[in-house]
Amino acid sequence: MAVTDLLRTVRFGGAQGRAAASSLLEAAQTGALKPHEAAEVKSLIAEPALHDVFKDGLGASLRQALTGSGGPVLDVKALLPDPKSLTNPKTLAPRFAADLTLMKPQLADERLPKDENAERLMEFFVAYAERFVDLTSHARLPDTPVTPMRPEEHAKALKQFEKALTDGGFKALVDRTSGQNGVELGRSLLDSKSVDELRQRTKEVSLEGPAKKDPANPNAATSIAVSAAHDKLLKQKNEEEERAHRRGRKGKLGANMVWNVLHLLRDGAETPEEKEALNQLIVSAALVLVFFAVVLTVLLMTL
């Protein structure tokens, strides 16, 4: 296919657009692109609408091929071990920790956007998490023996995974959907009852890469997790105040139904004249209550 046709196909996006982008990478690596074609490829890479076409390092690899610098960005799957080699759930967490340390420079590539690096790191972890859930949920694969784990061994493995995630910088990642950091999210995925459940939960994740620190206030919390937590607390506070208001306990005589009704009526008044009239009604009600209390006391004393 001619380069002009490849460029046209890329603009349509989707699977065909990604295949055309891969063909453009091969052409760029062999130096077959003309200057105006290379310029058009760079402009396509920068278009937000074509993010899915150039994800997983394809865009970065194209830039490198066009500039002649650096090596290609490898797909995450190319950095993972053969799943069939991971047969013992007891050693899976230490294996993940070692592999993450070895592969992290290629997973979190500085040439990629921070959100894409976050997605790559989580994709790498999820491969090990799926295998762990698969082995420990007794969903045995053909020709793959499963070594049973005692409860204390299972708990130890989860702690090892958590430590590996922490050491690997996953705390700096944030799920926009739940507000969890990467360690909390990874830990919750490991609690999935099946691989299908884990994969479904992974589809709902929307990761944000490490937040940039404010130079004027380096200790400021700029993560979306803080904002999500604040919004949640504010919502809870508003709901509690609304319930208290309905019960008539918002700084008023909550246990006395008459007073509650009068106060609620006053709160519903819209004009100063209406509020003044209701104030007079409240005073009158108070005097009536006092009168009946005095009469009742006199009657009780005469009996």
Image (cartoon, rainbow, N blue to C red):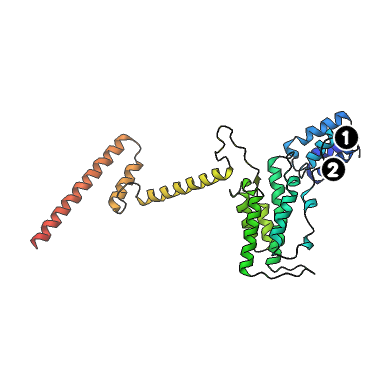
Residue 211 in sight from this viewpoint: yes
Residue 295 location, x and y as percent? 13, 54
Choose top left, top right, bottom left or bottom right for residue 201. Answer: bottom right
Mark 2 secondary-structure assignment: helix
The amino acid on which the numbered mark 2 sits, given as a three-letter code, is Ser
Estimate the x, y position of residue 140 in percent, counting from the top left.
74, 68
Q: Which residue is drawn at 67% across and 60% down?
A: 197
Residue highlighted by disc 1 = 4
Q: Which of 52 and 298 is in front in this view?
A: 52
> Residue under circle 2?
22
| Front residue (pair 205, 299) | 205
Which quadrant is home to the C terminus? bottom left
The image quadrant where one finds the N terminus is top right
Q: Nearer the viewer, mark 1 or mark 2?
A: 2
Q: Residue at x 70, y 47 (%)?
A: 119
Amino acid at dot 1: Thr
**Residue found at the very far left of the displayed protein:** 302
The count of marks equals 2
**Quadrant position of residue 96:** bottom right
The secondary element bearing badge 1 is classed as: helix
